[in-house]
Image (cartoon, rainbow, N blue to C red):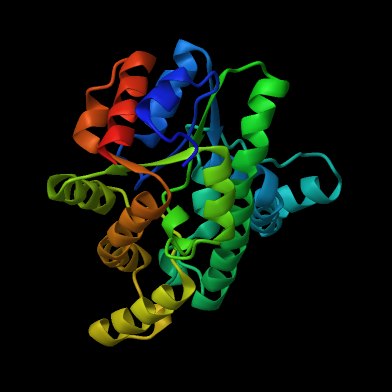
Amino acid sequence: MLYSSANDWKAAAHKRVALIAMSGLGKTYLSEMLRAQGGWFHYSVDYRIGTRYMGEHIVDNFKREAMQNPFLRDLLMSDSIYIASNITFENLSPLSSYLGKPGDPAKGGVRFAQYLKRQRQHRIAEIAASVDSQVFADKAISIYGYDHFISDTSGSICEIVDPENPEDPVLSALSKATLPVWIKGTDDDTDELKQRFCNTPKPMYYREKFLISKWAKYLEIKGCDEGQVDPDDFIRWGFGELLASRIPRYAAIAKNWGITVHAAEVRNIRDSKDFSDLIALAIDRN
C-alpha cells in the first residue's frame, strides 16, 4: 500500500486516497467536506467521465433530440443556438440521461442493443477516468498547490476491474497514486439504498456478461420481449441483483489493494482531522 502504517500516513506531507463504495454511502459527502475545509483536491471520476470522455456522446444525443423538433432543428442547422451539457460534481444527470434505461421507447426506454453500446462506451470512459486519478494527484500539487488529494470514484469501479489480478491495470494505477478506501455498509444501509433507488431509479453501469444474463432472466420472468419492458421496472429489479454482486467485489478490492472503513464511522466524521484519524485507525486495523 501507499502508506505502510498509521504513522506513515500521519507523517505524509501529501495524503492521497481513493474512496470506493456504492453511491449514497458517503464518498461525495467526504470529498466535498474535505475540499470545503481546504487543503484537499477533489477529483470526481464521474465528472471526468461525463466531460472528458463522454461529453461528445452526451451532447450529440441532445442534438439528435433537438433535430426532431422543426423549430430547434432550423436554429441548430443555422448555428443560431448552442447546445451543451451543464454537468457538475453535484449534477450528473446529463451522463445518466445518456446511459438511459432499456425497454419500451414509449416509456422512455432505449433498444437493448443501443443500451449495450452506451454501456461499452461508459466502460472505456470509466477505465480512463479512474486511471487519470494518478495524473490529477500530481496536478493537485504541481498546478493547484493542494497538499492532499481525494479521488471520488464511480460506484461502478468494481465492475471494470479484476481485484484478484495483481496486475489489474486500473487498480495498479490507482494504488500507486492513492490509498484505496472501501466504505463498507451494513445490511440496513443496503436496504436503505434499495429503497432510495426504488423511489428514484436511475441508469446504472453493469458488467456486460452480467447485464446480458440479467436481461435474459428478466425477460423470462416477465414473459415479454424487450419492446414491452417497463424501463424503470427493469432498473429497479436489476439494482437489487447488482448490489448483491458488487459487495464481494468491493470487499476483494479492499482486501487485496487497500483498507476498509465502515459507513457508520464515516457518518461521524466532521472535519479533516476526524477523517485522517479514521484512515490511520483503518490502516492499523487492516
* Residue 241 seen from this side: yes
x%, y% of residue 156? 44, 55
Q: Is residue 94 visible?
A: no
| Vertical order, 249 against 261 (above or below) | below
Q: Quadrant of residue 282?
A: top left
Q: Nearer the viewer, residue 258 or 212?
A: 258
Residue plotted at (28% across, 21% down): 269
The answer to whether 213 appears left or right of 244 in the picture is right
Q: Residue furthest right?
A: 78
Residue at horizontal 64 percent and vertical 25 percent from the top: 140
Judged from this view, the residue extending furthest toward the left is 188
232 shown above or below 26: below
On screen, residue 143 versus residue 282, left or right, reads right
Counting from the top left corner in percent of width and height, residue 205 is at 46, 60
Q: Nearer the viewer, residue 122 or 149?
A: 149
Q: Is residue 139 left or right of residue 151?
A: right
